[in-house]
Image: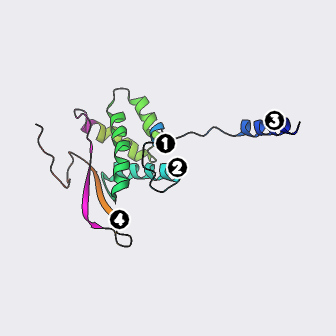
């Protein structure tokens, strides 16, 4: 009797909760690095970092964060390249935090890579480590843009 009452109470509480909307299925993958953070913190951090990358087109961060960020940034550029702009914008708006960055993604960055098949970002390892904890640092940037740190190699 007590178990039945407890089960009904749990059903009532779970029915009252609002559904949780995740930014994208890719941000909650078990194959990605955890970066010593909870899943909510990691998702928020990656969303902030990809928004900053779109806004500034180059950011300086630790090497593991840059390597984890790369697939998400490349997926967003792929959304911006596709012909179905409305659906791609809805998918990207779940991850990108600012409307200005979202507009730049679809108006500037997407058309820039219209003929390129993947490989939109580059991770450059820096020789200087971060002061304090000596973490390895990297720069992640978009390729084929003005003011890039390394000139791209010609295609083979």
SS for callout 1? helix
- The residue that disc 1 covers is 28
> In 3D space, how far apart are the residues under numbered discs 4 and 3 (Cα atoms)?
51 Å
Counting from the top left corner in percent of width and height, residue 16 is at: 73, 38
> In 3D space, how far apart are the residues under numbered discs 4 and 2 (Cα atoms)?
22 Å
Counting from the top left corner in percent of width and height, residue 64 is at: 36, 55
Binning the other alpha carbons within 10 Å of mark 3 as few (below 14), some (14 to 19) or many (20 upward) gives few
> In 3D space, how far apart are the residues under numbered discs 4 and 1 (Cα atoms)?
25 Å
User: Residue at 53% across / 53% down in the picture?
Assistant: 38
Q: Is residue 30 above or below residue 128?
A: above
- The residue that disc 3 covers is 8
User: Residue at 30% across / 37% down in the picture?
Assistant: 110
- Compared across the picture, whether 86 is left or right of 1 comes to left
- The residue that disc 2 covers is 39
N-terminal-most mark, 4 or 3: 3
The answer to whether the residues at label 2 and label 1 have Cβ atoms under 8 Å apart is yes
- The residue that disc 4 covers is 135
- Compared across the picture, whether 57 is left or right of 88 comes to left
> In 3D space, how far apart are the residues under numbered discs 2 and 1 (Cα atoms)?
7 Å
The answer to whether the residues at label 2 and label 3 have Cβ atoms under 8 Å apart is no
- Compared across the picture, whether 5 is left or right of 108 comes to right
**Magenta residue check for 118:** yes
């Amino acid at each position: 009797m007590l178990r039945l009452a407890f089960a009904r109470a749990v059903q009532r509480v779970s029915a009252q909760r609002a559904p949780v909307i995740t930014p994208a299925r890719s941000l909650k993958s078990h194959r990605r690095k955890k970066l010593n953070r909870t899943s909510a913190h990691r998702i928020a951090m990656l969303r902030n970092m990809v928004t900053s990358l779109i806004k500034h087109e180059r950011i300086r961060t630790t090497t593991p964060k840059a390597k984890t960020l790369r697939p998400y940034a490349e997926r967003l550029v792929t959304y911006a390249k596709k012909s179905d702009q409305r659906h791609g914008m809805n998918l990207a708006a779940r991850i990108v935090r600012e409307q200005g960055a979202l507009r730049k993604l679809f108006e500037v960055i997407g058309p820039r890579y219209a003929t390129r098949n993947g490989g939109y970002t580059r991770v450059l390892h820096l020789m200087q480590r971060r002061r304090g904890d000596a973490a390895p640092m990297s720069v992640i940037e978009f390729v084929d843009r003005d003011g890039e740190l390394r000139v791209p190699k010609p295609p083979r």
